[in-house]
Every structure is written in structure tokens, then in C-alpha cells.
């Protein structure tokens, strides 16, 4: 049988647990054990996916891979010969590594994913990865040191340090990240230390500050002197109003999903085109700096968006104010949808603007 590709994994019963519990539980799993010799005759093997598999033996004659996905690998140090110059993408999530340091120059590597590696303490000598474009350390809560060579990654466009709180506590780490000249997307959700002020790369377009406890930490100040941001995510925060030290000027997309305490969004930039406010249960009012705003995509229901619509109770309006819509009084105690000229009751209602206007029992003015 000719095996040109392989996918091996161990299986266990799924249940809900924290990432740290997950990492601890991995050490209790009995891994599937294979010998590296099993792969030596797979000359055409380019894509290899392993899940909670333990390999034994030498990597001297290991296939020249282009993509390596090895979740939950059990070594604490990258063995010699495993990472090869032809690799374009490495996904080593949930590993036991304490230190990541490339053993050789990997000129072809574009993507490095080390997410949920809870034992990882430091990332050293990234200069052997000169063409790296994506670095993901999502939920790696232990690292305190990121080598200064990260500032020399001239091709890096996406950096995910979500929940890496210890990284952001060290000022040298923040300074080195600010040196990235081509960085477009930065994820630091859940990772900003209290009362912190730091600069952002001028090239940045996408910024993720979700779950950063901004409601209790409104002193965070982000210094940004480059081109205006295109996208910002401030979701999963408990603030009652937008933080005053975060500049939204010229922003086009704003994500505020699950900000349950926010009551109003005032003086939003007129450049805003998309606004996401799912599960913002307290939100009642939205206004813009200019009536010439560009909003074209809006998710969730509020009472008023200045210059766009306002929901008022039909019961409070007299027939003179309704004009030719006097007939709508018939439905004042019902939840209905007005779609064009048609009325429907109990309609499944997802996105009311602009296709469906809810009258429950309110009138859109």
C-alpha cells in the first residue's frame, strides 16, 4: 500500500475544561507511539498531521515536509532534523515546549502556530525565520520573554498574543513589537496590563482588544501615529462607554459583541461602515460626529441610530401623526414585521435593517 499522506490521532471523550486543565490532562493520556522509520519510505509525503502521537527514533531520513501539524507533541525541545528548510507552515499547538528556538534557518516558513502551549516560557532567536508572516501564540499564558529579534521580522503581518498577559508586562517586549514595519493585524485581547501605555506599529490596520478588562482599566492608552485603523475589536468588555484613550478616528469596522454594560455610542466617526453590537443588552442610542455617515451594515437592535432610525411606541402616536399609516394602529399590541408593504406576525427576525423593520409594538421614524 502506497501511503503518500498520513493523519494519526488518539481519541478521548470530549468534555468541558479550561486550557490549563486541558494541558495537564494531556500528560495523562497514553499516546499512540510510532517510529520515525515508518515515514522514511514516504518519498512524496509533503503534508503531515499528527495528534497526540509520540514518535521515537532519529529524524535523519525524515521526509522533506512542506506542512507539519503536530498537536500535543510530547517533547520539551525541538529535536534535530524535524524542522526542515522546505517547511512553509508549522502548527504545534498544545505542545510541552518550554522554549521555542528554531534549530536552523527556515527561509520558506510563513506560518508558525504555537497556540495553547501553556508550558511555553520564552521565544528565542527568531532571526532564522526571515520570511515569517504569521505568528500565533494564542492563550500561551506563561511566556515572559520574546527575543528582541522579533523586531527584525520584516515580513510579519499577523501577530496573535491573545491572553499573553506576561508578555505585555515587559516594556522591552512591547518596544520590540513596535519595530515591526509591515504588521497589519495585532491581537492582544485579554493581555493588556493595568495602566499601560505603549505605541503601536504605524502599519497596523486590524487591532483586537477584546476581553481586556477595559471597564476597570480605562487608563490604557494606545499611541498610534500611522495610517488610521480599518478594524477594531473591543468585544467582551464591561465598560459603560467607549474608552476615551482609544482613538477611533477614520475607523471603518467596529466590533463590540458582548459588551453588556454599554448604554450609548456617541460621536462615532462618520467613516464607520460596519458596526457589530450583538448581546449589547443595555445599548439604547448611537450617534455620529457627522450626519453624512457611511454606516451600511449594522447588527442588533437599539432604540435609535441618529440620522438613520428611531423606534417609538405606536400606542403613543395619534392618527394625525401617522398620516396614511393610520392602519398600523391595528397592530399596536402585536409584534410584527413590516417588509416592504407586507405585514407578517411572529416572523423569525435576525437582521432588521434594512430588510425588516420590527414594530414590536414600535414604529420606526
Image (cartoon, rainbow, N blue to C red):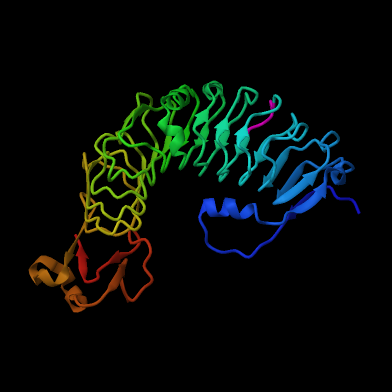
Report if residue 109 lies within the magenta region: yes
Residue 119 in sight: yes
The foreground one among 134 and 57 is 57
* Above or below 323: residue 128: above
* Left or right of residue 36: residue 297: left
Q: Nearer the viewer, residue 209 or 352?
A: 209
Q: Start and end of the magenta stretch?
A: 106-110
Which residue is rendered at x = 72% and y = 48% of the image? Answer: 49
Quadrant the C terminus occupies: bottom left
Image quarter hosting the N terminus? bottom right
| Above or below, 35 relative to 121 | below
Residue ID at (45%, 36%): 166
Q: Classify 18 as above or below 288.
A: below
Q: Main secondary structure of the magenta part?
A: loop
- In this image, 312 relative to 358: left or right? left
Q: Residue at x 20, y 66 (%)?
A: 363
Quadrant of the rendered structure where residue 194 is? top left
- Residue 171 on the magenta segment: no
Can residue 297 be seen here? The reply is no
Residue 317 percent coordinates (x, y): 11, 68
Amino acid at each position: 500500500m502506497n501511503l503518500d499522506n498520513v493523519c494519526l490521532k488518539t481519541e478521548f471523550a470530549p468534555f468541558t475544561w479550561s486550557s490549563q486543565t486541558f494541558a495537564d490532562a494531556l500528560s495523562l493520556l497514553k499516546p499512540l507511539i510510532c517510529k520515525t522509520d515508518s515515514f522514511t519510505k514516504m518519498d512524496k509525503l509533503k503534508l503531515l498531521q499528527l495528534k497526540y502521537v509520540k514518535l521515537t527514533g532519529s529524524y535523519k531520513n525524515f521526509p522533506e515536509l512542506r506542512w507539519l501539524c503536530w498537536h500535543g507533541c510530547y517533547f520539551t525541545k525541538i529535536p534535530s532534523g524535524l524542522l526542515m528548510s522546505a517547511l512553509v507552515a508549522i502548527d504545534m499547538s498544545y505542545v510541552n515546549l518550554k522554549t521555542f528556538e528554531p534549530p536552523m534557518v527556515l527561509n520558506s516558513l510563513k506560518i508558525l502556530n504555537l497556540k495553547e502551549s501553556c508550558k511555553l516560557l520564552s521565544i528565542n532567536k527568531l532571526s532564522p525565520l526571515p520570511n515569517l508572516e504569521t505568528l500565533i501564540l494564542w492563550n500561551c499564558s506563561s511566556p515572559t520573554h520574546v527575543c528582541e529579534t522579533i523586531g527584525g521580522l520584516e515580513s510579519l503581518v499577523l501577530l496573535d498574543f491573545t491572553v499573553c498577559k506576561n508578555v505585555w508586562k515587559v516594556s522591552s517586549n512591547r518596544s520590540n513589537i513596535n519595530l515591526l514595519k509591515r504588521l497589519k493585524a495585532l491581537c492582544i485581547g485579554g493581555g493588556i496590563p493595568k495602566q499601560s501605555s505603549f505605541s503601536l506599529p504605524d502599519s497596523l490596520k486590524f487591532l483586537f482588544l477584546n476581553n481586556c478588562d477595559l471597564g476597570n482599566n480605562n487608563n490604557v492608552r494606545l499611541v498610534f501615529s500611522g495610517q488610521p485603523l480599518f478594524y477594531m475589536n473591543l468585544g467582551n468588555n464591561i465598560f459603560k462607554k467607549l474608552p476615551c484613550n482609544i482613538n477611533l478616528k477614520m475607523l471603518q469596522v467596529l466590533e463590540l459583541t458582548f459588551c453588556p454594560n454599554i448604554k450609548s455610542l456617541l460621536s462615532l466617526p462618520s467613516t464607520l461602515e460596519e458596526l457589530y453590537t450583538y448581546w449589547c443588552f443595555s445599548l439604547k442610542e448611537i450617534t455620529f460626529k457627522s450626519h453624512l455617515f457611511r454606516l451600511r451594515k449594522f447588527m442588533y437592535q437599539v432604540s435609535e441610530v441618529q440620522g438613520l432610525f428611531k423606534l417609538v411606541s405606536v400606542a403613543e402616536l395619534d392618527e394625525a401623526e401617522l398620516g396614511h399609516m393610520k392602519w398600523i394602529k391595528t397592530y399596536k399590541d402585536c409584534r410584527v414585521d413590516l417588509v416592504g408593504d407586507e405585514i407578517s406576525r411572529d416572523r423569525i427576525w435576525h437582521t432588521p435593517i434594512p430588510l425588516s423593520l420590527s414594530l414590536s409594538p414600535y414604529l420606526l421614524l
